Amino acid sequence: MSLYRHVKVIVPGMSLSRRAALAATARSLGVTTSVEESIRETEAELRSLSDPEPVPPRAELRRQVAETAADLEAKRERVATVRGRLRETDDGAIEADYRDAIRALSEAETEHAAAKEALADARDRAREARDVRERRLRLEDRLENLERRAREELIAAVSPAVETALSRVPNRDPPSFDAADPVSTALALIRVGRIETPITLACRRFPDRDSAERWLKAPVYRL
């Protein structure tokens, strides 16, 4: 979030995320950190991770493997039985039964092989999906740590100047940045940072618009 978004309206009782606003102040001045490149690389790695395809329920696939295996065994027994009968006779009807049994066995073998392949594929896809999830979590954790470090560096870069500005806020003498009221804090951040969009002032800390702009070094609307 830009500094302007933090301090665009200065009014008593305003809400202000102090550390985020400090970091935004540094960003407005073009301050960079030692982890900028690492953050960009990590973000790029995260974007490169594609969402895994849905994995079909493996319980259903295992059931299909078991069913096709049972059917295959039955077809093999049928072929063996008809083959035995065929050896004992030259009956053309039995020869036809044997050909049908062989054809049914071939189909059962194909179905069983397809079921096993589908189960193996589902296992591979589940493994790949798990690997992607784990990698995404590692990258997200790394990015969070990098962003935390960047934020600390940004805050350290501008904190002395903000403390100095805070000690000069009109009509107030806050003991520290953390103890200062939100309006005083926001005014100090504006003075230190760089803002080109007019700020709306409704805090009566300055006698007029010109004096506010001179102190803040930023354009203002005064209510």
Image (cartoon, rainbow, N blue to C red):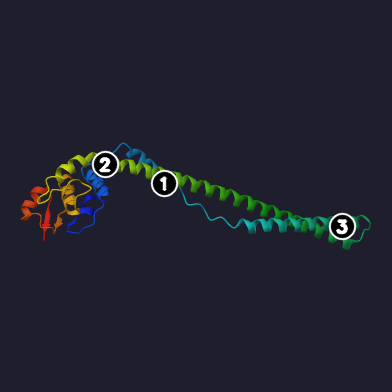
Q: Nearer the viewer, residue 143 or 43?
A: 143
Q: Which residue is mark 1?
A: 140
- Label whose residue precedes the other's in the sequence (2 or 3): 3
Q: Give x and y (percent) for residue 73.
A: 78, 55
Q: Residues within 10 Å of mark 3 (few under 14, many from 20)?
A: few
Q: What is the spatial separation of the Cα atoms under label 2 and label 3, in whole angstroms?
A: 83 Å
Q: Three-letter amino acid code at disc 1? A: Glu
Q: Is residue 118 left or right of residue 33?
A: right
Q: Which residue is mark 2?
A: 154
Label 3 residue SS: helix
Q: Three-letter amino acid code at disc 2? A: Leu
Q: Which residue is mark 3?
A: 81
Q: Give x and y (percent) for residue 79.
A: 83, 56
Q: Is residue 29 above or below residue 93?
A: above
Q: What is the spatial separation of the Cα atoms under label 1 and label 2, in whole angstroms?
A: 21 Å
Q: Is residue 180 left or right of residue 85?
A: left
Label 1 residue SS: helix
Q: Give x and y (percent) for residue 78.
A: 83, 58
Q: Give x and y (percent) for residue 152.
A: 29, 41
Q: Residues within 10 Å of mark 1 (few under 14, many from 20)?
A: some
Outermost residue toward the front in this view: 175
Q: Quadrant of the C terminus?
A: bottom left
